[in-house]
């Protein structure tokens, strides 16, 4: 699958743009703040129905305007065409369509456009809280497993309801174990399958990740991603029972798969504390490349790969190696941003791969053709 054409209207700093892409590598070059990353974010929108960077859709409307629109024409491996459209108006909810047909649930679109993004913000996965790492593992699995996504949405919905119930008990100085048991039953129902699929994912993902870390880092250091979950030791039912008193007094559900984490290790030590800046960057790039590889084998066709500001992550030798890697036939369509046209042009000329370069300045986009 590849993105043939992208049209933007009033998206972030871009008033209007219409781009035709190469099936292989596409580069956006320009100064910092020109709008290169915004184009990648628009492509990300078409895959995940949301921005990679902001939680509010309306914040992505060009200042002074009352809507934004993103339209992408995709070509599948069977040469079928799909037009994906996202429109956000100030006064209404977001509209998301495939071939002009509105989705009833945005979750129904997830997985149709497999995509992996590598960004400087990926370092947050190492340095920030466990919620980001859970979102990562959930995002990868959800792209190829709609049942998992459905279970996860239901679990989070029930969790919110259980927490509301606990808060009401506290406020009213009243407690009814039978009412809470109704929510517990549903949490138990969804937690088990989610836990098992997360565990299986990490087991299958690790050998791929180690392979890409060796390629990106040029070393043979042992890296690991450990799935940390209380469900390793006890079933959800027992965890809830043991945590009941704590839950009552905190008005919050303290145990469950919503507390899971991923431990990032290098030579059996936490990457966050003991990894150098270079090791941390190599670690995250390898995670994302392994995500590409894993998703490719699961869905049966190549995800689109977005590489945002890769020179921020790696030295020039590593970047040259990475560009050469993604330029081979194993990878599909790739989008890259860089501040220096001459630098990226040199790398692309050396591997003689089909490509297009777009100049971006103050939200305006121009190609060589």
Image: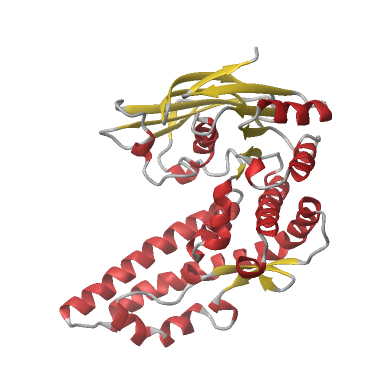
**Percent x, y of residue 310:** 65, 42
User: Which of the image's four quarters has the N terminus?
Assistant: top right
On the image, the x and y values in percent for residue 85 come to 46, 29
* Closest to the observer, 120 or 82: 120
The answer to which of 310 and 248 lies nearer the viewer is 310
Quadrant for the C terminus, please. Answer: top right
Q: How is the image coloured?
A: secondary structure
- The residue at the point 44 percent across, 42 percent down is 106
Residue drawn 66% across and 26% down? 341
In this rendering, is residue 186 above or below 49?
below
Question: Is residue 180 visible to the viewer in this orientation of the structure?
Answer: yes
Query: What is the quadrant of residue 136 in the picture?
Result: bottom right
Q: Is residue 148 left or right of residue 165?
A: right
- Residue located 53% across and 20% down the image: 365
Residue that sits furthest to the left in the current view? 172
Q: Position of residue 253 (x, y in %)?
A: 38, 75
């Amino acid at each position: 699958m590849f993105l043939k054409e992208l049209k933007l209207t009033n998206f972030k700093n871009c008033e209007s743009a219409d781009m035709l892409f190469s099936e292989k590598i596409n580069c956006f070059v320009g100064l910092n703040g020109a709008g290169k990353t915004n184009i990648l974010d628009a492509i990300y929108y078409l895959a995940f129905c949301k921005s990679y960077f902001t939680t509010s859709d309306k914040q992505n409307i060009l200042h002074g305007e009352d809507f934004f629109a993103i339209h992408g024409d995709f070509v599948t491996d069977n040469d079928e065409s799909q037009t994906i459209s996202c429109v956000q108006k100030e006064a209404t909810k977001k509209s998301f369509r495939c071939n002009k047909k509105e989705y009833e649930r945005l979750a129904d679109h997830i997985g149709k456009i497999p995509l992996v993004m590598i960004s400087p913000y990926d370092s947050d996965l190492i340095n920030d809280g466990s919620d980001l790492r859970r979102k990562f593992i959930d995002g990868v699995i959800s792209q190829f497993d709609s049942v998992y996504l459905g279970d996860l949405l239901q679990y989070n919905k029930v969790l919110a309801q259980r927490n509301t119930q606990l808060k009401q008990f506290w406020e009213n100085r009243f407690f009814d174990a039978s009412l809470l048991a109704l929510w517990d039953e549903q949490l138990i129902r969804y937690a088990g399958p989610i836990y098992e699929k997360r565990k299986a994912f990490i087991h299958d993902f690790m050998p791929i990740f180690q392979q890409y870390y060796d390629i990106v880092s040029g070393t043979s250091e042992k890296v690991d991603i450990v799935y940390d979950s209380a469900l390793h030791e006890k079933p959800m039912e027992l965890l809830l029972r043991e945590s009941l008193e704590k839950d009552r007094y905190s008005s919050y559900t303290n145990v469950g798969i919503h507390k899971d984490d991923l431990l990032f290790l290098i030579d059996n030590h936490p990457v966050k504390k003991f990894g150098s800046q270079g090791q941390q960057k190599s670690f995250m790039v390898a995670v994302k490349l392994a995500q590409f590889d894993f998703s490719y084998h699961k869905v049966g066709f190549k995800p689109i790969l977005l590489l945002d500001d890769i020179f921020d992550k790696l030295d020039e030798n590593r970047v040259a190696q990475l560009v050469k890697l993604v330029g081979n036939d194993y990878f599909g369509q790739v989008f890259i941003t860089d501040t220096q046209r001459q630098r990226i042009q040199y790398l692309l000329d050396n591997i003689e791969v089909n490509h297009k370069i777009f100049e971006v300045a103050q939200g305006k986009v121009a190609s060589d053709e």
